Image (tube, rainbow, N blue to C red):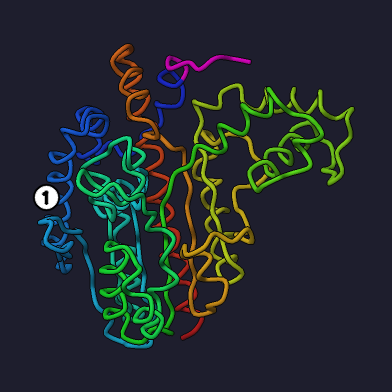
Amino acid sequence: MRKFSISYWLDNVSKKDFSQDMKLLNTEIMSELLYAEKRSVLLDRIISNIKKIAERHEIEYMEIPLGSSGLFIPVLYREKSDPNSTFLLLLGAQHNEYNGTFGILEFLNSKMNKSLFEWQKSCSGGFLIIPVLNIRGFLHPIFENKWGYYVTGINNLQQTNCNRFWDKTLEQDIFQKYESSIPEESRVVGDFLLRLRQDPRTPLTVLDFHETSLPYRIRKEMTQTLNLNYLSDLNWIKEVTLESAFKYKGISYLNKKRSEDIKWIKEAVTEMSEHIQEKAIYFLFYSPYSKDLANFLDSHLQKEFASVLWYSSRYIVDHSQKIEGCFVSANMSRPWMCAIEIESHKLFFNLPEEQKKYEENLQYGKYLLNQLRLNSNIAANVIYFTLKYLSSRNNKEK
């Protein structure tokens, strides 16, 4: 198996121009993301950029306060002019995952933003854009909050995942019942979103951006520990990896695995993973009510990123393995919703490890920057093609 090669990335993948005109994604951003003491500088730059976007395009800018902490969640929004029209939510950085943050900003700073205003004008819809939800985790990435994963800061070390409460924020009666148990970030955003949407059962489209290390970890795990016992307990990523191995070898996928399959499956996964660190990945999680959108996005994203995507049998995943509280799970029983969870390559999972690599090899910073640009470009295109999808649906309904 070929070892990770930064030079391969720099010589091949990075030649494609991703987000080059996105001023936030410059060489300084790596140290600002990797070192906690520099996060406030980066947040100031993000807020400054958001304010300029608001002024340039006459979008409302608001700072949603977080209690008496002095912290706030910076958002952009426009209200609906037709109370029955669609509302769009773009949500980034619930965890220490920043594809959504910089993908949103790339979209808003590029010519792609025209699609947002054209859609909004054509259907009289509204939108709420949140580049960074987990402000505490963003500003204070420490071991106790899993380097910014949980919504905790220096003085509050309770580990809370704000992505487990959205189902309790979507309808007023349910929100009032559970309000006291919802973490502050989800609570204040949920309350604001209810007011903006006006009628809680009118159409709501949600793009919820995340990152994951699972595809990389599982491929590595399979090359080392694969056996029949392993194959007897498959989750979604193991299933996708196995499907990909069969497809890679040109063999029809079989639900029942045999002991004689183990060797060639390991070989296939090893070959598929040869340039795994130098390729991009996305997975789109959907509900029965967002499957059509997921298929639409996937068809366009595969064309747009064909040269840099790693090998996979599929890039969309049925969210039937319910995760309590997230938007896609909430969508399972709410036909007026259309929620997609977007997963990309996780980059800042363990800050001390990443700092060590960065300090020992300056080229690693360039690799991280290019990966962040690629993740962000995928996210920006997800937004763009979603708006194309919504516009086409709106035109059909007229």
The residue labelled by disc 1 is 48
Asked where in the image residue 268 lies, by quadrant, the reply is top right
Secondary element at image label 1 = helix
Asked where in the image residue 97 lies, by quadrant, the reply is top left
Q: What segment carries the magenta color?
A: 1-8
> Dot 1: within a 10 Å radius of its alpha carbon, few (fewer than 14), some, or many (20 or more) residues?
few
Q: Position of residue 66 (x, y in %)?
A: 18, 61
Total numbered labels placed on residues in the image:
1
Q: Position of residue 345 (x, y in %)?
A: 46, 38
Q: Position of residue 377 (x, y in %)?
A: 38, 44
Q: Residue at x 32, y 23 (%)?
A: 366
The correct choice, above or below, for 380 with respect to 291 in the image is above
Asked where in the image residue 215 lies, by quadrant, the reply is top right
Image quadrant containing the N terminus: top right
The correct choice, above or below, for 249 with respect to 92 in the image is above
The correct choice, above or below, for 218 with respect to 126 in the image is above
* Residue 242 on the magenta segment: no
Q: Position of residue 23 (x, y in %)?
A: 20, 39
Q: Residue at x 28, y 68 (%)?
A: 189
285, 96: nearer the viewer: 96
Q: Residue at x 18, y 47 (%)?
A: 46
Q: Is residue 230 left or right of residue 75?
A: right
Q: Residue at x 36, y 87 (%)?
A: 199
**Mark 1: amino acid:** Ser
